[in-house]
Image (cartoon, rainbow, N blue to C red):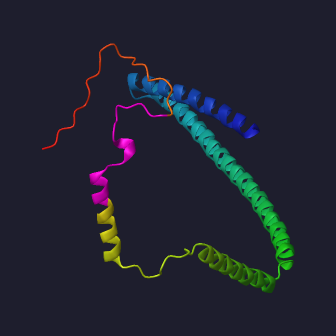
């Protein structure tokens, strides 16, 4: 930016003037009051006025830069706002066009039809889930007595598939080959 270049140039001039003012200050500290000291003081005052003038210019340029950046930001925000408004207008038109095609009465009819169909499906499932030849009311005590009787039968005979755990089943042609080298100890059932 041209403004940034001007600001940099002014800052260099201010630093140069600061150096001159430091030199004048040293000279005035060494001089005794009189015409020599007054001449150095006059030059220091002119340098200080010049420095103030450059500082004012720098402050003005800084403010101008800030104003330009603010204007650019406002312009960019306005562009973004306009783009957003245009997008909203387009979306609004499209939504109106699409919703204009929708008939709420048809939607309600479809909804009620769907409810009826689901209710019919539930009735069908209930019908298919009914048991045949099972009385609706079974006495719990009768069921418990039958279960107890089954348990007593099982204790007397025991299921045939559990009668001999070490016997090879009939459907196996050859007995299994033991992979471990140590012979396994047979489990002995103890009753207490």
**Along the line of sight, the residue nearer the viewer: 17 or 158:** 158
Which quadrant, please, contains the N terminus? top right
Left or right placement of residue 186 versus residue 129 in this view: left
Q: How many badges with numbers are in the image?
A: 0
The residue sitting at 50% across, 76% down in the picture is: 134
> Is residue 160 on the magenta stretch?
yes
The residue sitting at 32% across, 49% down in the picture is: 158
The residue sitting at 57% across, 41% down in the picture is: 52
The residue sitting at 62% across, 73% down in the picture is: 128
**Along the line of sight, the residue nearer the viewer: 128 or 136:** 136
**Along the line of sight, the residue nearer the viewer: 21 or 133:** 133
| Residue 14 % position (x, y) | 59, 33
Above or below 130: residue 181: above
Q: Quadrant of residue 98?
A: bottom right
Left or right placement of residue 77 versus residue 169 in this view: right
Left or right placement of residue 170 versus residue 157 in this view: right
Above or below 63: residue 143: below
| Residue 58 % position (x, y) | 63, 42
Given the current orientation, which residue lies at the most extreme top position? Answer: 181
Q: Quadrant of residue 102?
A: bottom right
| Magenta highlight range | 151-170
| Residue 111 % position (x, y) | 72, 80
């Amino acid at each position: 930016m041209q403004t940034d270049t001007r600001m940099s140039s002014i800052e260099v001039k201010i630093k140069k003037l600061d150096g001159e003012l430091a030199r004048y200050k040293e000279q005035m500290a060494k001089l005794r009051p009189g015409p020599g000291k007054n001449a150095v003081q006059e030059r220091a005052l002119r340098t200080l006025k010049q420095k103030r003038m450059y500082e004012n210019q720098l402050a003005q340029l800084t403010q101008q830069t800030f104003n330009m950046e603010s204007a650019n930001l406002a312009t960019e925000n306005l562009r973004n706002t306009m783009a957003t408004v245009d997008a909203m207008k387009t979306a609004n038109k499209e939504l109106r066009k699409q919703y204009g095609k929708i008939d709420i009465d048809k939607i309600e009819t479809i909804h009620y039809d769907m409810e009826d169909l689901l209710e019919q499906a539930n009735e069908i499932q209930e019908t298919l889930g009914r048991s045949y030849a099972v009385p609706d009311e079974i006495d719990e005590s009768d069921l418990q007595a039958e279960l107890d009787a089954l348990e007593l039968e099982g204790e007397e005979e025991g299921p045939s598939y559990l009668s001999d755990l070490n016997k090879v089943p009939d459907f196996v042609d050859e007995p299994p080959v033991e992979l471990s080298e140590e012979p396994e100890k047979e489990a002995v059932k103890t009753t207490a």
